[in-house]
Image: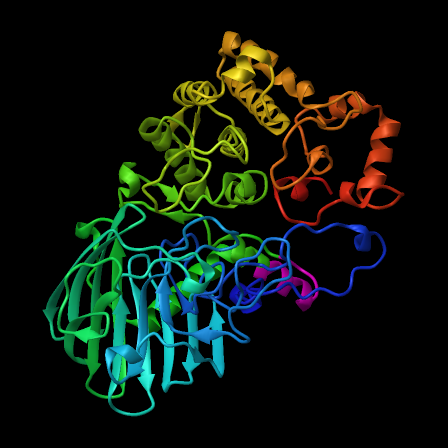
Amino acid sequence: MSRYTDYADVFLGCDEIDLPEPLGVAARWRFIKGLCGNTHPGAALPFGRLSCCAYSGAYSAGYGRNMPNTGEKIRKLYDRNKFIGFSHFHHSGTGYIGLFYNYFVTSPFYGGIGEAFIPSDMPEERARPGYYSCRSSRGAFCECSVTDRLAFHRYSFDRPGGRVAVDVSHNGLARETGAFHLPEDAEMHILGRACALVSVVQEGVRLWARIECRGASRCRLWQGNREGAFEFDPQTPFGVVFDIEGQRAEVAMSISACRGSLAEPSGGLDLAAAEADARWNDALGRIEVLGEEKDRRIFYSNLYHSLVKPVFWTGEDMLGLGKGPLVGELATMWDVYKTELPLLFTLFEDVRKGVMETFMACERRLGGFPHCLLMSGNTAIEDKQARCLAEHSIADAFYRSGAGSDIDGIPLGDILAACDRDMRRPGREDFFLQGACHRATHTLDMAEAAGCVSALAEAAGEAVLADRYAALARNWKNAFGPDGLMRADSEYYEGNRYSYSFRLMRDMPGRIALCGRERFEEYLDSFFGFSKGSPKDRFQGFNNETDMEAP
């Protein structure tokens, strides 16, 4: 089997989950999240920084028809998918994460600038890995693909008089969602009848874009409903607009955090789509699945969406972290450190090396390992969801890279020193002084991380450090109450003491012995609905990191 991309459905998980009525044990589970996938079908490369997709303003990737949701019935922004234009940079699989990108929305239209960016129906929509197309009911067939440094759009208009506008100011989702943000600064320059250079600060990060429209007869600036003028005002949308000579135009857009890294367009959409298909075929082919076609389609569709993020920032000097083999869009470690990252570390050495280099760069620049890393000047290291998750991934990378004296070229001694500093970062003293944190989950996080650091220190021959962290690792017991479940007097993030009580741990025999095997099995039977128990104590479906582990 050589055409793995033929089995990848990029639309999988882009709307509400279509499941049959749960029966048996599953009918007793208590789902706490909105049952939608929050992925998008846009053109992207494996771990590619750029993405291009139909923008509607819906939650959470800017694609589709949903309003923001958590556990309630999913409200709709539209009754069907809409097309406003193509947007760039998207989350994939996240929930409400605070910023939503969808930068440089590019819209084909007719008439004055006030006619651009109006939602239209999509009577036709197709996509495959690395390529996306749709037909707008407003009179244009729209296609896009991407390379490492360029996004290509092609617009085929139904009649002459077509125009293409780019909203440089846009940031987030539709205003109705409440997830819309204003730009902080901008400048725009016309380079000729078919090209513009723009710069805008979004979320504390200055982005540069070189926008060339092949087939354009004129390029102008716009602001609000006025064409030919621009003076920065964050309250008024602004951008550039191209008049099209015939009925076809191709936009080549390079976007970078470094002006010097902007790419001159070469090739075009068809070549970009062909190269993207080849790269996706190689990435998906790292695992070959035998069996029925239905099984292969399920597997490769899920694998595809698992390889969209994180993304390479190499060469960008994003957030002042340097231009090395950096990886961004870790959103969040809570969701990926025991699920996606072990898979990627096994299959893709460059991703493993990039994540490790990024951890070390963040520790040097920000004073700790990241819990979430986005294109945002707000790089505060959050401790609410969890603590010290990077240490687990570092240990994972150590074993998967061969368990030698370094991890992908980074000396183990340097890594251990960074782990020790991260563990002892201000605000985490309670674990070292009292053996427990305010939140029982944080106690478990830090104890398990201490076990990882101890194992790394032992491998490096640093016996004193290994013994010190081995003793700290035994504090995991302080996260549990006398009944053998997580402490009842603690707060729990997106879950409860029951959903956290069945996490995978380094010392599972010791964890089971804390309850006694018979009582532990009784707890499991109740939790998964095999025996009577309170509905609020039940398994909560596949919603969070803890829910992924418990089954």
Q: Which secondary structure class fits the magenta region best?
A: helix
Residue 465 is situated, as x and y percent measured from the top left of the image, at 50, 11
Q: Nearer the viewer, residue 299 or 220?
A: 220
Which residue does the image show at 30% across and 92% down from the upper left? 159
From the image, which quarter does the C terminus lie in?
Answer: top right
Where 479 falls versus 255 (above or below)? above
Q: Nearer the viewer, residue 229 or 48?
A: 229
Q: Does residue 23 appear left or right of residue 466 in this picture?
A: right
Numbered circles on residues, count: 0
From the image, which quarter does the N terminus lie in?
Answer: bottom right
Where 408 falls versus 180 (above or below)? above
Where 109 falls versus 402 (above or below)? below
Q: Quadrant of residue 438?
A: top right
Q: Does residue 510 appear left or right of residue 3 in this picture?
A: right
Q: Quadrant of residue 196?
A: bottom left
Residue 500 in sight: yes
Residue 102 is situated, as x and y percent measured from the top left of the image, at 37, 60
> Residue extending furthest top?
464
> Residue extending furthest left?
192
Colour scheme of the rendered structure: rainbow
Residue 348 on the magenta segment: no
Residue 284 is situated, as x and y percent measured from the top left of the image, at 52, 57
Which residue does the image show at 63% across and 26% down from the upper left? 440
Where 189 falls versus 93 (above or below)? below
Q: Quadrant of residue 488?
A: top right
Residue 527 is situated, as x and y percent measured from the top left of the image, at 80, 41
> Residue extending furthest bottom?
159
Which residue does the image show at 39% across and 45% down from the upper left? 374
Q: Does residue 447 appear left or right of residue 482 in this picture?
A: left
Residue 285 in sight: no
Residue 299 on the magenta segment: yes
Q: Tell me which segment is drawn in magenta.
A: 289-301
